[in-house]
Image: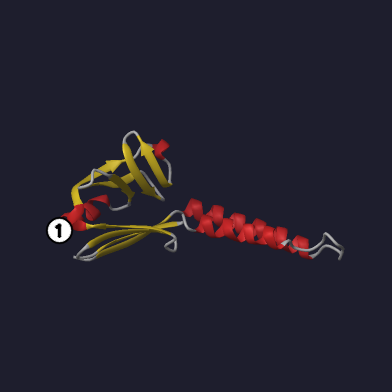
């Protein structure tokens, strides 16, 4: 049973576009300066601005794919991704994350788990044979849980 969904964080998208617009304005302002020794865009600052926008863009979306063997998650364009063998999953629960768990990728020490989320508070919590716990945010927790349970060996 194949399942694939992508959710978008419109807040993160707006923050990324705002940062990109601001950095573009800074770059164009540096280009417009009259020529002198210290005028014009600085290569290191330009690269830093590009890296920041690419990093921010990597938290705009979260994709979930469940196929015959793997449960995969990918943030943004795939810079941050994780895959789980379905046969390693021991438990699947639908949970609601408190607001203070936040968004993005987080490691929580109590309860001991990893959190991947871009939007909302609904999530699916999976337990693995090695004792690790992961919470993956989704807008369709019942569907994700059902697909994982259907795909388990």
Is 20 or 78 nearer to us in this picture? 78
Question: Splitting the image into 4 quarters, where does residue 26 fall?
Answer: bottom right
Q: Does 129 sit left or right of 30 as displayed? A: left
- Is 3 or 52 nearer to us in this picture? 52
Residue 146 in view, yes or no: no
Please identify the residue farthest to the front as the structure is shown: 130
| Residue in the foreground of this view, choosing between 82 and 64 | 82
Q: Secondary structure at mark 1?
A: helix
> What is the quadrant of residue 20 in the picture?
bottom right
Residue in the image at 42% along x and 62% along y: 78
Q: Position of residue 36 (x, y in %)?
A: 87, 63
Residue 28 lies, with reference to residue 105, above or below; the image says below
Asked which quadrant contains residue 144, the reply is bottom left
Q: Position of residue 12 (x, y in %)?
A: 50, 52
Q: Residue furthest left?
A: 153
Task: Name the residue at 42% across, 36% down.
Answer: 100
Q: In which quadrant will I find the N terminus?
A: bottom left
- Tell me the crowding category of disc 1: few under 14, some 14 to 19, or many 20 or more residues within 10 angstroms, Cα based: few
Vertical side of 36 occupied by 145: above or below? above
Where's residue 62, x and y in %?
A: 39, 57
Residue farthest toward the top in the current orientation of the protein: 110
Residue drawn at 20 percent across, 51 percent down? 89
Taking depth in this image into account, of 107 and 119 the one nearest to the observer is 107
Measured along the vertical axis of the image, is residue 91 above or below residue 74?
A: above
Residue drawn 16% across and 60% down? 151
Q: How many marks?
A: 1
Q: Horizontal and vertical percent for residue 31?
A: 77, 65
Residue 8 lies left or right of residue 122; in this view the side is right
Task: Read off the residue under disc 1.
Answer: 150
């Amino acid at each position: 049973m194949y399942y694939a969904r992508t959710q978008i964080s419109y807040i993160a998208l707006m923050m990324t576009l705002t940062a990109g617009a601001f950095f573009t304005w800074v770059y164009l302002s540096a280009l417009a300066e009259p020529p002198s020794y210290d005028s014009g865009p600085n290569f290191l600052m330009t690269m830093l601005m590009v890296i920041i926008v690419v990093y921010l863009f990597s938290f705009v979306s979260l994709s979930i794919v469940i196929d015959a063997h793997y449960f995969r998650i990918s943030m943004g364009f795939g810079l941050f991704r994780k895959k789980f063998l379905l046969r390693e999953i021991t438990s699947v629960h639908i949970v609601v994350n408190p607001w203070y768990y936040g968004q993005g990728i987080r490691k929580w020490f109590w309860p001991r788990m990893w959190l991947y989320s871009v939007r909302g508070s609904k999530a699916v919590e999976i337990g693995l044979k090695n004792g690790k716990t992961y919470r993956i945010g989704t807008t369709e927790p019942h569907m994700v849980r059902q697909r994982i349970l259907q795909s388990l060996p």
